[in-house]
Amino acid sequence: MATGGRAGAAGTRAGLDKRPDEVAAMFDRVAGRYDLTNTVLSGGLDAGWRRATREALGARRGSTVLDVAAGTAVSTVELAAGGVHAIACDFSQGMLAAGAARPVPKVAGDAMALPLADQSVDGVVISFGLRNVADPVAALREFARVTRPGGRLVVCEFSSPVWAPFRTVYTEYLMRALPVIARAVSSNPEAYVYLAESIRAWPAQPELARWLQSAGWVDVAWRNLTGGAVALHRGTRA
């Protein structure tokens, strides 16, 4: 795993103006076929990314973990494997409703104002959701507030491929092929134009590591998945 450098002044936006009410409404509209669309767009890699996220968190049996931006709670079910008490949290009521049958507790909440007490969980995970938050650094501070000392944060997010030729192909896929595929399988294909743009605007691995450090997380490091198209960032609550 690569380690984060010295924390500097972190930007709090990732290139797009993201109003929470508009983003939540967008996810409400895509909720019906969200899981299918993700699997198709990722070429089936999404299941492996979820397993890698659970392993990076390393939560012990009986511990309590909060899954922020959990969507339909597919990722929460993965986190709950092995006897972990995993809670799904999302600000889209439509997404939570779409995952109502999944056997994990669910709570509606904004990543920047979580409905949890201070130091109430042993770990926090956010998968492919931090880039949709209006102020990512504020959210990272909020994750630290609800995490007990020694607890771990794992951020699974799209990132910057490390090999230049692959990075070029990946960017072309995001901006050309992804919207076309989304039109065939998604319940709201227009939303995936925004999602592609949000991925392209997101900072590379070292910058996100600095954001974690500026929010108070220590022992910050990251590991690339799929050639850096996805990265797992982790930090520990001091």
Image (tube, rainbow, N blue to C red):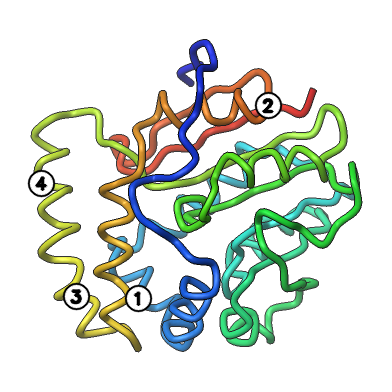
Report the Cα–Cα distance between label 4 and label 2.
Answer: 33 Å
Asked if marks 4 and 2 touch (Cβ < 8 Å), the reply is: no
Find numbered disc 1 in the image and state the secondary structure of the residue it sits on: helix
Report the Cα–Cα distance between label 4 and label 1.
Answer: 20 Å
Instruction: Give the mark, 4 or 1, whose residue is nearer the N terminus.
Output: 1
Find numbered disc 3 in the image and state the secondary structure of the residue it sits on: helix
Instruction: Give the mark, 1 or 2, whose residue is nearer the N terminus.
Output: 1
Report the Cα–Cα distance between label 4 and label 3.
Answer: 16 Å
Q: Foreground mark, 1 or 2?
A: 2
Asked if marks 1 and 2 touch (Cβ < 8 Å), the reply is: no
Residue displayed at 54% across by 45% down: 136
Q: Which is nearer the eye, 157 or 14?
A: 14
Image quadrant of residue 17?
A: bottom left
Question: What is the number of the mark on residue 217?
Answer: 2
Report the Cα–Cα distance between label 2 and label 3.
Answer: 38 Å
> Left or right: where does residue 66 sit relative to residue 35?
right
